[in-house]
Amino acid sequence: MAEFKVLGGILEELAAEGVRVWLDGLCRDRLASGRLDRLVRDGRAAGVASDPALCARAVAESPAYHEQLDQLAHRGVGTEEAVRALTTYDARWACDVLMPVFESGTGVDGRVCIETDPRLARRTAATVAEARALSWAVNRPNLLVKIPATTEGLCAMSQCLAEGIGVNASPVFSVERYGAVLDAYFEGLERALDAGVELATVGSVVSFFLGPVDTAVDASLDELGAGAVKELCGEAALANARLAYRLYEERLGSERWRALAAAGARPQRLLWTATQVGNPAHRDTRYVEGLVVWGTVSAMTEATQEALADHGELRGDTVTGEHTAARGVMDALERLGISFAKVTRELEEQALRASFAAWERLSGAVEDALRRPHGAPDRVTRPEPGPPLI
């Protein structure tokens, strides 16, 4: 792993512009080594999101999970229950690491996102039941449960919010889908208010994806083969995100939102994610630099953070007032025959399939580990008092 580097000034600049940095990826190694704690203390992680694919690799390759897996195996625990035990343990530990951030601010940062089983994405009642179980198992106020932003998932999201369960709506690729997420958020808060839930305690973010959008649109532009389309390469993701922020501003100006805000509700923040740039011809920091605007979150891998420290350049707010130009980019794509609605529908399906595959890999790794005793490993160092292993 690369030597730890304090980013210092550029993260302070981002914070001054209202952008908070969350870490993309959570696993036991980052917890047990104390690295997450260092990242939090140095301002490099005001929040963190779990990643089943990363967890699957760690379960297969790292000794950090051996002790808990052995205990689960001795109890005869099944694979699905074991997956939940491992992931909720990691989330609970991460919540404790980030609790000072959560408590020192207004309760919007210091959040930890945990995945629901993506195989439930098309089943509203099952997703709600899973979210309740995860919230109960982790039992920390700074937890957000990640719920797929499918039609069924949006119904589940409203129900969870109505019960006071914080939600991360993910993945979102289009402004249209984002509008539906906002509707679900408002509905959930209104139901929570009617139920007597304190709205200020209900947190939520929307994971708005970037990199895959440009990858898909640029592939369509390459097929056209016209020199004039070069100007549009690498522009779709930023334009799409800027239009989403414009919609966010419009909805926060509505009477419906003002009534919720008066009751203590907080805005559902846009979380820019998949901020790794796939095209080497473009700056690897462009998704961070191009989406600097108040009240947002930028989820980054450590590699993206290092690139930002090395050659990142901030130019102040790069979103407000850019919606007209952004609309021009989207209109130009449509004139070329590229249906952005079709692109985003395909991306949503691809994202769901990728989530299914990652979850299957995690389940497979846990199943293999339960069958294979690890003996008596070195005990994992946990904060005291730490959460129970099982």
Image (spheres, rainbow, N blue to C red):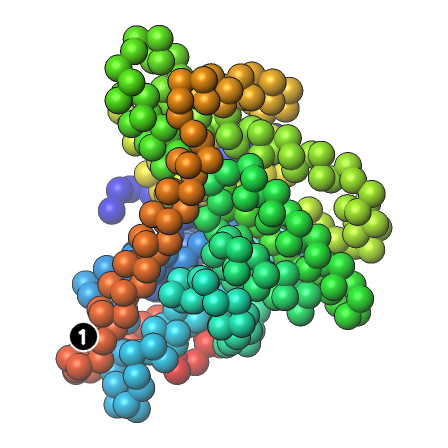
Q: Is residue 261 above or below residue 276?
A: below
Residue drawn at 43 percent across, 71 percent down: 88
| Residue in the foreground of this view, choosing between 297 and 338 | 338
Looking at the image, residue 258 sits to the left or right of residue 368; the answer is right
| Residue in the foreground of this view, choosing between 346 and 380 | 346
Instruction: State which quadrant residue 276 falls in.
Output: top left
| Residue in the foreground of this view, choosing between 251 and 41 | 251
Q: Residues within 10 Å of mark 1 (few under 14, many from 20)?
A: some
- Across and down, in percent, residue 45 comes to 48, 47
Looking at the image, residue 108 sits to the left or right of residue 96; the answer is right
Q: Is residue 40 above or below residue 193?
A: above
Can residue 256 be seen in this snapshot? yes
Residue drawn at 31 percent across, 86 percent down: 77
Residue drawn at 60 percent across, 54 percent down: 204
Residue drawn at 40 percent across, 25 percent down: 338
Q: Which residue is mark 1?
A: 368
Q: What element does badge 1 sit on?
A: helix
Which residue, as the protein is rendered here, is positioned at the far top?
228
